[in-house]
Structure formats: C-alpha cells, structure tokens
C-alpha cells in the first residue's frame, strides 16, 4: 500500500552520544518543566519517566484533559513511566525555550485540529504517543515535544532531535481509503503554505520551502523537514497519525528556517508556536477539501510547490526474459490518482513510478508501470 511504503524521516538529526533528561522542582503544586543535555546510558534511559502536559482551547477540551489525567488513561511505548499534568498545574519557563501553549492557542482558529494538546519537554516519539492513545484523545489532537530521542522515520529508522526543531504529531480519521495515501501530500502543502503566510504577515523575506516527493521539505536545496504518516484500519475507519519534523532554530546538521532568515539580514525570527498554529489553520481547510472533493483541487498548488515538474529521471522496468531490469529515462508530469508519480517516456508512453522499497532516496531505484 502506498501509504505504508511512502515514509520519510525527520531531518532533525542529533548526535546519539547524548540523550536528554529534565528536572521537575516542586513548589506549591506548581511544577516547572525544563530539559537539559545529559549523557545517559540505554539502561538509565529506560528507567527515566516522561512528562505530558494536557491542555485544550475550549472549556470542554480542558475538562477532557482533567479526566484523562485523573483516570491515568494515557500511556507511552516500551513501558516508559509517564507523569501527566494539566496546564494550570505548571509554570512554563520561557527562558528554556519551551513550547508556549498560550501563544500557540491564541493564534489557533480551527474547529477541530490542534485544539487538544499534549506537550512535553522530552519524549521518545510524538508519533508513538498519538498512535498508542488514538482512541483516548479527540480526533485532531496534537502532541509536541521540545526534544525527541526515538523519533520515527522511514523503514523504522530512529532519529534523535535537538532543541530548536519543531516536532509534533496529530490524528485524523478517514473513511475513504482512496484518499488516505494522499493526506501526506496535504500535510506537506499545508506546512509550505503556512510558512509563506507567516512571511507575508510579518513582512519578512519569503522562504521558498519546497516539497520533494513524497514528503520531504527543502529550503534552498537543503532538506529542512519531513513528514511521516501511518494508519490502522479499525471499525471501518482509517486511524491516521501524521508526524512533522522541521528545522526552525537548529542550524545543524544542515540548516534551519531562521538560519536562512539571518543570512537574508532579517531581524525577525520565526517561532515554533506561530508555525504550528498557522499550519493547523491551513491544514484544516485543505483537509476538508481533500475529504469532500478529493486531491484534484489541491494538485495544481502542490505541483507549483514541489521540485519535480519536468524533471528527467532514470527508472527501471523488469523484463520477464532478462535477469537485469531495463533502465530508461522519463519526464515527471505530476501525480496519478493513486498518489504515485506520473511520467512520460521519450516515446510518449505514460507510466506510473513506484519506489523499489530498498533505496533511501526515493528517486534512486524507481520502478515504472505502464498506464493504459
């Protein structure tokens, strides 16, 4: 299935020589969350606990947060210990560059997506949190972490992500399996459009973030982010979890949005909170279009944003009479209805391109299938 095969990794790498811990000083039932870099062994890592701060935009969502905490309904993978707090029980420390919940909520205008929030200074994987607790939290819930030490990527790759990265996952529910593989493209498109909107709103130089198929984000030819989508089919509905990783302030190992802004002599620096709220405001609109009209109304904008229109690439085609595949050159034209690349050969034959499942770069090892 395309949705399971087209996975890409977060590009917010960090040296595996360090992991992350946090301290929680107590004072009159008001808790302060912070994260610091500590060299921790794998054995110690498994013994550490993690914190989730639950919050909601409306009073109903805040009551749900309270219920989840009181009933200890949430869990982490690998039996890691979890401590949950309500936003009203903590004292956020802006000097530690923690995600500011109030700033985020103030800019959020959605009716469903991103309104219920699970935040943490340090988690193994935001994707695991929303996937494991999918049935406990509202559809559209978002989990965000300042630091992630077992982030999930393509082919079960695991990434460690530093502070400065925007790392979040959220949930969706879908009934039509034909559009499920296309939602990853909508996530990519919503992020690129959100960044464009923020640049226009704040009067800063435009950041030309582009999409590399199927779901990587590039800026000035350098990868700055990636999307991961997974799904499970239960009770005649697809439970979809989408994860986003974006280099906002972390300049290594490649570059970040704010590093490019500094090079452009911009005095403005983008914040994770405004990017996240702008993303959900844009995504909710695009998602409704996808569900009600399909991907076609969004395809033109998507193809304007990606890197591949007119790109010529080498593909492989297996011949039953030959042991080795035949290589040929094709030109990318767009997407097929199933979400794969559509290309045309030099003899005007239309074909659909599939990744071979073995190459880290999807554009190495593409296999073509003729279309009628």
Image (tube, helix red, strand yellow):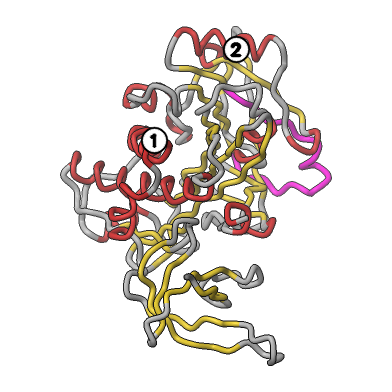
Q: From which residue to which does the magenta span run?
A: 36-53
Q: Residue at x 63, y 87 (%)?
A: 325
In which quarter of the view is residue 76 placed? Answer: top right
Residue under numbered circle 1: 292
The picture quadrant where one finds residue 54 is: top right
The image shows residue 255 at horizontal and vertical percentages of 41, 60
Q: Nearer the viewer, residue 256 or 284?
A: 284
Which residue occupies 65% across, 14% down? Answer: 68
Task: Looking at the image, tell me whether mark 2 or mark 1 is earlier in sequence order.
Answer: 2
Whether 212 is drawn above or below 40: the answer is below
Is label 1 in a helix, a strand or a loop? helix
User: Where residue 286 appears, x then y in whole percent?
Assistant: 36, 39
* Residue 141 location (% of width, % of height): 52, 27
- Disc 2 versus disc 1: distance between alpha carbons? 50 Å
For mark 2, give the secondary structure: strand
Image quadrant occupied by the N terminus: bottom right
Q: Nearer the viewer, mark 2 or mark 1?
A: 1
Residue beneath disc 2:
27
In contact (CB < 8 Å): disc 2 and disc 1: no
């Amino acid at each position: 299935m395309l949705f399971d095969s087209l996975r890409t990794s977060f590009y917010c790498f960090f040296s595996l020589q360090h992991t992350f811990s946090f301290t929680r000083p107590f004072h009159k039932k008001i808790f302060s969350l912070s994260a610091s870099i500590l060299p921790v062994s794998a054995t110690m890592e498994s013994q550490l606990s993690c914190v989730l701060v639950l919050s909601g935009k409306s009073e109903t969502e805040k009551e749900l947060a309270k219920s989840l905490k009181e009933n200890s309904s949430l869990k982490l993978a690998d039996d890691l210990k979890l401590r949950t707090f309500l936003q009203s029980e903590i004292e956020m420390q802006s000097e530690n560059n923690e995600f500011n919940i109030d700033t985020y909520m103030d800019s959020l205008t959605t009716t469903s997506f991103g309104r219920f929030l699970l935040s943490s200074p340090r988690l193994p994987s935001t994707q695991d949190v929303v996937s494991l607790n999918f049935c406990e939290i509202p559809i559209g819930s978002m989990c965000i972490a300042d630091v992630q030490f077992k982030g999930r990527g393509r082919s079960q790759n695991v990434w460690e992500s530093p502070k400065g990265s925007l790392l979040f996952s959220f949930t969706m529910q879908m009934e039509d399996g034909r559009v499920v593989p296309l939602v990853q493209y909508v996530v990519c498109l919503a992020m690129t459009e959100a960044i464009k909107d923020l640049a226009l709103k704040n009067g800063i130089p435009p950041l030309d973030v582009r999409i590399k198929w199927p779901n990587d984000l590039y800026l000035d030819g350098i990868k700055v982010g990636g999307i991961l989508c997974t799904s499970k089919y239960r009770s005649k509905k697809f439970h979809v979890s989408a994860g986003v990783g974006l280099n906002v302030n972390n300049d290594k190992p490649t570059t970040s949005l704010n590093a490019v802004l500094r090079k452009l002599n911009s005095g403005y620096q983008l914040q994770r909170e405004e990017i996240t709220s702008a993303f959900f405001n844009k995504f909710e609109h695009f998602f409704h279009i996808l569900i009600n009209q399909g991907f076609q109304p969004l395809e033109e904008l998507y193809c304007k944003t990606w890197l591949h229109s007119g790109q010529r690439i080498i593909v492989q085609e297996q011949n039953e009479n030959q042991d080795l595949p035949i290589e040929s050159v094709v030109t990318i034209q767009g997407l097929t209805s199933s979400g794969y690349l559509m290309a045309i050969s030099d003899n005007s034959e239309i074909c659909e391109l599939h990744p071979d499942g073995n190459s880290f770069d999807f554009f190495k090892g593409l296999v073509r299938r003729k279309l009628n």
